[in-house]
Image (cartoon, helix red, strand yellow):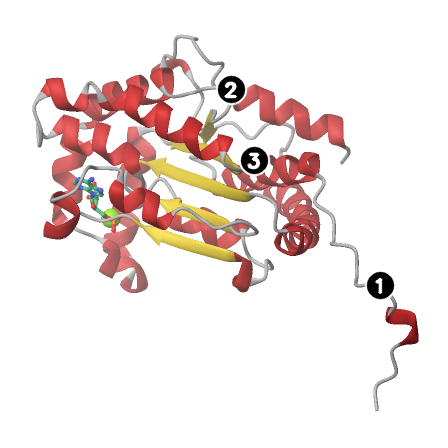
C-alpha cells in the first residue's frame, strides 16, 4: 500500500465543504477494493504497525494534538472502531472520552465546556466517543433546547473547531454510517449474545424509531460542519472490517503527512559514561 492509495480512500469519504449530502444515497455496506475480510484485516494490520510508529513519534514530537471524533447511531461501532484501530498504539499517548447524558454541572455551563476540557494536550491523540455533535443530534431530535438555540450551534461548533485547529489540534471526524437493517441485526445480536446483553438498552429502540429524524440531524451536522480545517468523513460501516480499515487508513495518512519527528537529543551524549 503506498501513499497515493491512502489518498484515494480519504478523498472518497470526505465530505467536501459546502457540498450537499444525501445520506440515503451514500453506501453503508461497501467494501472498496476488498472482496474478502482476510485482505482488509491484513491491510489493517500493516497500518496498525505504521500507526504505532507514527504515534510514538507524534508523542515525542510534542508539537500538535490530534482529536478524533466518532459519531454514529447506536451499534454503529464507535467502541469497536476504537478497539480495533487503536490496538497496538501506546496507551500512554491516547485518551478516550465517552460523552454521556450531561451532568447537572455540565448542563449549568455552555455546551462546549465539557468538550473543551477533554480536548487532548499536545503530543496526544484524543478520541471522542460521541461529542459536542450530540448537542445538534439527540438534543435536536428530542427538543431538549428550543430550535433557535440548537440552530445557532453549527456556527459555534465551526468557530470552536477553528479555534482548536489554529492552536495546534488536528481534527478528524468520522460518521459511522450504518443502514437501519444492519442496526436491527446488531440490536438482535446484543439480545441473543450473553456477553453483549449488557449493551442493550430498551431506550435504544426509542431512538431507532426516530431514525429519520436522526438522519436529518446528521445530514445538517455533516453539511454545515465539514470544513477544510475539520472535515467530516462518512464511513460505510455495515461491514466492520472495512470500517476499521478505512478509519485506520485515514488516521494513519493524516499522521504520515504531519511527518512528526523525534526531537534532537541533547548535545554531547557521545561523551556520557554511565557509572
Ligand atoms: P452510550 O454512548 O450508549 O453510552 O450512550 C450515551 C447516551 O448519552 C446516548 O444516548 C447519547 O445520546 C446521550 N448523550 C450524549 N451527549 C448528550 C447530550 N449532550 N445531551 C443529551 N444526551 C446526550
Ligand atoms: Mg448505547
Q: Report the residue at 44% width, 34% height from top.
A: 164
Which residue is at the front of the view, 169 or 220? 169
Labels 3 and 1: the sequence-earlier one: 3
- Whether residue 23 appears in this view of the structure is no
Residue 38 point in image, percent of width and height: 64, 46
Q: Which residue is mark 1?
A: 267
Tag 1's secondary structure? Answer: loop
Quarter of the figure with the C terminus: bottom right
Q: Position of residue 197 (x, y in %)?
A: 24, 59
The local secondary structure at tag 3 comes to helix
Q: Quadrant of residue 251?
A: top right
Name the secondary structure under disc 2: loop
Q: Quadrant of residue 263?
A: bottom right
Q: Mark 3 or mark 2, which is nearer the start of the sequence?
A: 2
Q: Is residue 178 above or below residue 57?
A: above
Q: Tell me if I can see residue 242 in this picture.
A: yes
Give the side of residue 125 with respect to residue 45, left or right.
left
Distance from the alpha carbon under mark 1 to that under mark 2: 40 Å
* Residue 237 image offset from top left, x and y in percent: 44, 34
Q: Can you identify the residue that label 3 sits on?
A: 246
- Could you tell me if the residues under marks 1 and 2 are in contact, i.e. CB atoms within 8 Å? no
Sooner in the amino-acid sequence: mark 1 or mark 2? 2
As drawn, the label of residue 228 is 2
| The N terminus - image quarter | top right
Badge 2: how crowded within 10 Å, few (<14), some, or many (20+)?
few
Residue at 51% x, 27% y: name it. Answer: 30
Which of 33/149 is in front?
149
Question: Marks 1 and 3: in contact by CB < 8 Å?
Answer: no
Left or right: 132 in relation to 262 = left
Q: Residue furthest front?
A: 268
Disc 1 Cβ-to-ligand 1 distance below 8 Å? no
**Residue 32 rendering spot, x and y as whole percentages:** 59, 27
Amino acid at each position: 500500500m503506498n501513499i497515493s492509495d491512502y489518498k484515494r480512500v480519504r478523498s472518497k469519504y470526505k465530505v467536501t465543504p459546502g457540498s450537499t449530502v444525501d445520506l440515503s444515497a451514500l453506501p453503508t455496506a461497501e467494501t472498496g477494493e476488498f472482496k474478502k475480510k482476510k485482505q482488509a484485516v491484513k491491510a489493517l494490520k500493516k497500518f496498525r504497525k505504521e500507526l504505532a510508529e507514527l504515534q510514538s513519534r507524534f508523542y515525542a514530537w510534542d508539537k500538535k494534538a490530534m482529536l478524533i471524533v466518532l459519531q454514529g447511531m447506536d451499534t454503529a461501532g464507535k467502541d469497536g472502531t476504537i478497539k480495533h484501530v487503536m490496538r497496538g498504539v501506546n496507551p500512554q499517548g491516547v485518551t478516550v472520552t465517552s460523552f454521556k447524558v450531561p451532568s447537572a454541572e455540565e448542563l449549568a455551563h455552555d455546551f462546549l465546556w465539557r468538550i473543551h476540557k477533554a480536548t487532548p494536550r499536545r503530543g496526544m491523540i484524543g478520541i471522542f466517543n460521541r461529542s459536542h455533535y450530540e448537542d445538534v443530534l439527540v438534543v435536536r431530535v428530542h427538543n431538549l433546547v428550543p430550535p433557535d438555540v440548537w440552530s445557532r450551534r453549527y456556527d459555534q461548533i465551526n468557530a470552536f473547531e477553528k479555534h482548536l485547529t489554529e492552536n495546534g489540534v488536528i481534527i478528524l471526524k468520522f460518521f459511522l454510517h450504518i443502514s437501519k437493517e444492519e442496526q436491527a441485526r446488531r440490536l438482535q445480536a446484543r439480545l441473543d449474545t450473553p456477553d453483549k446483553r449488557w449493551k442493550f438498552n430498551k431506550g435504544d429502540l426509542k431512538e431507532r424509531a426516530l431514525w429519520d429524524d436522526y438522519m436529518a440531524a446528521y445530514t445538517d451536522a455533516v453539511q454545515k460542519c465539514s470544513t477544510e480545517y475539520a472535515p467530516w468523513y462518512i464511513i460505510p460501516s455495515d461491514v466492520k472490517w472495512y470500517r476499521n480499515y478505512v478509519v485506520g487508513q485515514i488516521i494513519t495518512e493524516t499522521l504520515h503527512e504531519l511527518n512528526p519527528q523525534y526531537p534532537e537529543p541533547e548535545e554531547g551524549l557521545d561523551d556520557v559514561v554511565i557509572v
